[in-house]
Image (tube, grey):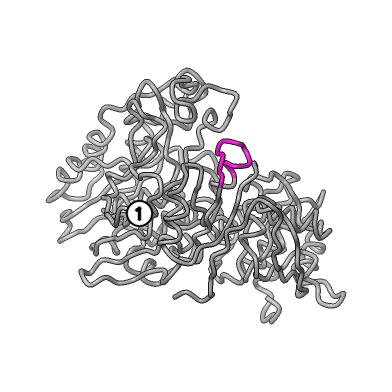
Amino acid sequence: MNDFNYGKVATFTEAIANVSTSDQNKYIAGGTNLIDLLKYNLLQVNELVDVNGLREETIKQLENGSIFLDAFATNADTAYHPIIENEFPLLSKAILAGASAQIRNMATNGGNLLQRTRCYYFYDANTPCNKREPGSGCSAINGYNRNLAILGTSENCIAVFPSDMCIALAALDAVVHVTSPDGDRKILFEDFHRLPGDTPHLDNNLKHGELIIGIEIPANNFKTNYSYLKLRDRNSYAFAMISVATGIELNQNKIENISIALGGVASKPWRVKAAESFLVGKEPTRENFSAAAEMIISGAVGFEFNNFKIELAKRAIVRNCLMALNPASQLPGAQPSL
Amino acid sequence: MRTKEITSTLIKANASLIKLNINGKNHQIELKPWVTLLDCLREYLDLTGTKKGCDHGQCGACTVICDGKRILSCLTLAAMKDGSEITTIEGIANEGELHPLQKAFIEHDAFQCGYCTPGQICSAIGMFKEGKAKTEADVKDLMSGNLCRCGANTNIINAIMEVKNGGVNERL
């Protein structure tokens, strides 16, 4: 890690003032990805501004019925909060499927959105990588790409966004609240992360200096039928090959509302609302979920070592939607059940 | 609610002075901002019980308990924990008497090379404090951040389960 300054701030104003003075200044909260990137010299900073002191209540209830997750609260405190466990259990399960208990005790909600891909080539500074160094090439497209994307890719990058929490946030129509020297704004979750296109070096639509202050989640009716499924090379402590977040609202055995988001397939959580609309009014059967899965995976392109993900994703969607009908049967670590 | 008074402290790249309470003892340490908590414990304070297994947050050997929560000391800057209370493996025995987990690890042959062991034990202590592990499946999942390359995992889980099921123990 290179020489850098470090300091704690006590207010949002101080935080954004200090980071905005230079592109080389960054916020640090949990540090679980940022410190790792510094160790690998994938990131150089001039100053780290510690924003942990800005934390307030883990969860606030808003007047419009939504909840507001504090950006500086830990993933563990969020996952185990009674409001999340009881009213937004899909989010709790997704968070608890990620990382390890130690990391969840450190990592923050805001930081989870900002974690970078774990593509081996991004992490290996000896290899060409358009995300790390625009224009240098993509080593993954013709390399070992087993854990990389099948949707939304471009000729420049096939990186995957590795978060579990964010797959649930996408399914729950979260809204990211941000502050900056230019004022406050809200970013719909579907607009937060980017596909690589011609700008693979940009993971998200934040401007430098913008600080995530919280994540709003509207009230929903997914607390009875929900499931998070994470398929990976081992049963714990690994990133998803494929993950699926499903929330279903049933009314007399017909789907009243459904949300399905996919992880492990793209540089952002993947939702296809047309597939969800297709399911509304239908019975929650394997046949209907399979048809929806085809729609969600439409356009997928596999590479030499990850082509299996296309069929696996379809089956995972079906399985997870069926699992959502019986949340009590779910296993720790978001393993397959039923 | 903010429970600590935070004052702004932009520290320049020169060494800064931080305070840590480690295993009940107060320390003042002068170090650079980029020193990890792990290196602070091992290199600055000679507390080498906590191990550097991977230094990248992937193995759990560096697990310590900070302000009651188990964390990875390799992915924490010492400066971030200025003012915190840390418990390391050196601090869990009670005046020479082994902690119940230490006894159980011996009885169940739960370590071979011993390198993951301090992290395993501190992680298990943290897990008990969290109070979320109900079943053995939960214990396996919640201990999954601690790897054991020697393959003592089965015995590690057995040791932890014995202590978990061992009735009232105030020290946990």
Q: Is residue B28 left or right of residue A333?
A: right
Residue density around tag 1, few if under 14, some if 14–19, many if 20 or more, within 10 Å: many
B13 vs A239: above or below:
below
Give how far across and how far down residue A212 sits, in percent: 38, 55
- Residue depicted at x 20% and y 43%: A273
Where A130 falls versus A338 (above or below)? above
Residue at the image position 29 percent from the left and 51 percent from the top: A171
For label 1, the SS is strand
- Residue A272 horizontal/vertical position (percent): 23, 40
Q: Residue at x 33, y 34 (%)?
A: A195
Left or right: A95, with A237 as reference point: left
Q: Chain of mark 1?
A: A
Tell me if residue A40 is in the magenta stretch: yes
Which quadrant of the structure image shows residue A327?
Answer: bottom left
Camera-nearest residue between B85 and A208: A208
Hey, which quadrant is residue A242 in on the image? top left
Return the x and y of residue A37 as percentages of the image width and height: 57, 41
Residue sitting farthest toward the left: A281
Residue occupied by mark 1: A180
User: How many labels sit on residues?
Assistant: 1
For the N terminus of chain A, give its image quadrant. top right
Give the answer, above or below, for where A40 lies relative to A248: above
**Considering depth in this image, is B161 or A241 the residue closer to the camera?**
A241
Q: Is residue A335 magenta?
A: no
Q: Look at the image and give the residue range highlighted in magenta.
A: A36-46
Main secondary structure along the magenta-highlighted residues = loop
Farthest-out residue, top: A142
Q: Amino acid at mark 1?
A: Ser
Q: Nearer the viewer, residue A87 or B83?
A: B83
